[in-house]
Amino acid sequence: MQQRILTSLLAFALISLLGNAQDLYPKNESVDVQNYVFALQLNDENNEIQGETQISVTFKDQVVPFALDLIQKSGEFGMEITEVLDNGSAANYSYSENRINIVPKDAASKTQTFTIKYHGIPERGLVISTTKYGNRSFFGDNWPNLARHWLPSVDHPYDKASVEFQITAPEHYDVVATGKKVEESNLENDYKLTIYQEPAPVATKVMTIGVTEFASRLLGEVHDIEVSAWVYPQNRLEGFGDYAVASNVLDYFINQIGPYSYAKLANMQAKTQWGGLENAGTIAYFENSVTGNNTVEPLIAHEIAHQWFGNSATEKSWNHVWLSEGFATYFCILYLESVYGDERRKEELAIDKKEIFDYYLKNPAPVVDLTITDPMRVLSVNTYQKGGWVLNMLRHKLGDATFWKGIRKYYETYRNSNALTEDFRHVMEEVSGQDLEAFFQQWLFTKGHPQLNWDWTFSKSKVTINVEQLQEHQVFQFPMEIGLVKDGNMTIETVQINNRSESFEIKFKEKPDSIVLDPNQWILIQDMRPN
């Protein structure tokens, strides 16, 4: 998701024990879903869906009971199960508290197939509504754990699987979904079957369908990946123009990070609760993203960056969602820097810095906040903007070459898999040869940031700078650039801050006209001097 659209819109010794502490989803890591086939029937008479889901499961050690998430019918909304099959025959199962609990009958086979037949009206997850132009529409909007409202599944990103969507709908609809289209067939009674298959493992949070009257265009092929736009016919040309930049963004990230994981890259105008939703290979952008003015390049860059971070290399615990949102935030900035120059990077980071400081006044919490138990609460300025700032500081600490080498290694290691913050740290330590524990501890697992009071004097060709950290809970340690300005020219010196109070002497022939701390936006510091 793109947080700016929404807002305008513990020591490391314990991390291995606490990394999943507050993610309360009951993981069953002895069971691994390999593939989903979601067959869905949609209609124009009502909002009830008919579903048949086939799930292929591998048992890692021995065959054990397992559970799937599916919201039960309560009042108007929810699902009713009509049949559950275990390898083709009636299954031994129970359905309570929105969980389908299955006890496999075959105790020997390590890979088995189960089928769930059900129907109902989803309250969330599948948004059945009308577009802003009044056309009936169906859009998957699963993030973070809303797939369970319409798809029987392990509705948590730790267990990813390949997926096939088989959508039967009235023939006047156009259908796009996760994966590559492999069939479109007209059926009897004015219905049409459309099938999409995605062979790469995908978390349910980023599986989707889009069903409405679309105008679609192939925007190009990038490294043999088809890039397309799916927009409303009423704003067809504006949408094709606004979304065309997706090809450039995809090319940049493939070249900088590594191979793209999914069968295609569709960019879809949609009904979504978010500014953008990074569904794997089928990104949803809010309806008014289409303007014809090419204003959504940052949003597109953010959501495409997610295809690497969040979708392919996926957080294993919701409390580590900065590995998704912080990365997408900063890699959007990296893309903009590559196109528009370093001044754009500094502008974006300055905007984010102000939001971080304002947020901290009311929400003094760390980026990796182990007190959060609800996935809907993990998104914040901390996980977006501050997470992005941490990557900016890490880049400065390691240097561009080592930073990018580490990013590529991290993606290569955890592509189509899951990671925690400590996994990212270990990769960056391996590549850099540095111990990064203290860096990660103070910026990700400790609340706040350096709040500085400072002054300077000049005497006998020396500038003396006095710096004091005002925050009480933590003394931060960091390098800091100091810009000395004379006659419009800036000289930059770097000092190391290790203590609450520090004084530095810098040789300088004449009295500077002004002094600027961190002129290049490399360290998350807040200037607390009175205006």
Image: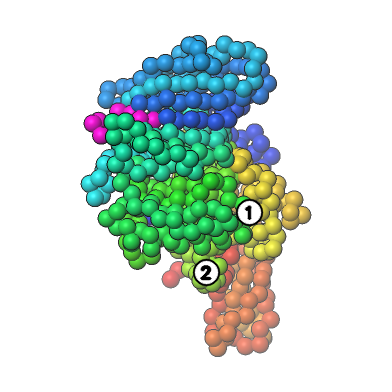
Say above or below: 408 vs 375: below
Magenta segment main secondary structure: loop
Residues 520 and 152: in front is 152
* Residue drawn at x 48%, y 68% as measured from the top left: 347
Residue 256 x %, y %: 62, 59
| Residue at (53% x, 46% y) in the render | 263
Stretch in magenta: 40-49
398 and 441: which one is in front?
Answer: 398
Q: How is the image coloured?
A: rainbow
Q: Quadrant of residue 106?
A: top right
Please state if 41 lies on the left or on the right of 223 as rendered. left
> How many numbered circles are shown?
2
Q: Amino acid at mark 1?
A: Gly
The circle drawn on residue 405 is: none
Q: Is residue 43 magenta?
A: yes
Q: Position of residue 255 (x, y in %)?
A: 61, 60
**Tag 2: residue type?**
Val
In the rendering, at what x and y percent does residue 495 appear? Answer: 67, 69
Badge 2 is on which residue? 339
Q: In the rendered image, which residue does mark 1 sit on?
A: 258
The residue at the point 35 percent across, 44 percent down is 174
Q: Quadrant of residue 59?
A: top right
With 66 as the anchor, is 276 left or right in this view? left
